[in-house]
Amino acid sequence: MAIKQKNIFVVDDDELMAAMLKDHLLKNPLNKVTVFNTGEDCIKNLHLGPDIIFLDYELDSINTAAADGYQILQQIKKLDKDVQVIMLSSQDEYGKALQTVVKGALEYVVKGDDAFKRIDRILGE
């Protein structure tokens, strides 16, 4: 069985977090990673066929006019129900996690010390 390249989108308005996640994901040379700082930019580029989207729950924390991650998740799932979305959040809140999984997110990962280890487990790396 051939190993397939993963087309991954990282959507986070925190440029440092987005850069750190991109660098971590690129440790696997088969990963192709594209970063977007708004959910709207992600939606505009869904035609590029991402396999996985890492989506920040608090996308509107820097630009309050932007849609938040929960709103973007719902739009993504309307346009492509098969793409895997992993929500990222700095808040460890059960209600938010459940809400996103009900709307189609594969996982809800809390940003922190073990976030990259958990992401590696999700990706099977």
Image (tube, grey):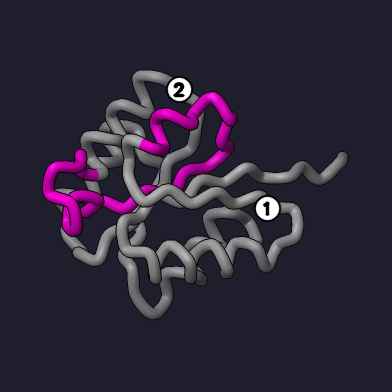
**Which mark is on residue 31?**
1
Q: State the extent of the magenta-drawn residues as a range.
A: 41-68
Q: Residue at x 67, y 68 (%)?
A: 27
Determine if the magenta segment contains residue 51.
yes
Q: Secondary structure at mark 2?
A: loop
Disc nearer the start of the sequence (1/2)? 1
Determine if the magenta segment contains residue 87.
no
- Report the quarter where the N terminus lies: top right
Q: Amino acid at mark 2?
A: Asp
Q: Secondary structure at mark 1?
A: strand
Residue at the far right: name it. Answer: 1
Mark 2 lies on residue = 80
Q: Residue at x 50, y 61 (%)?
A: 119
Q: Amino acid at mark 1?
A: Asn
- Crowding around mark 2 (Cα neighbors within 10 Å: few <14, some 14 to 19, many 20+) is some
Measuring from the top left, give residue 17's x and y in whole percent: 39, 68
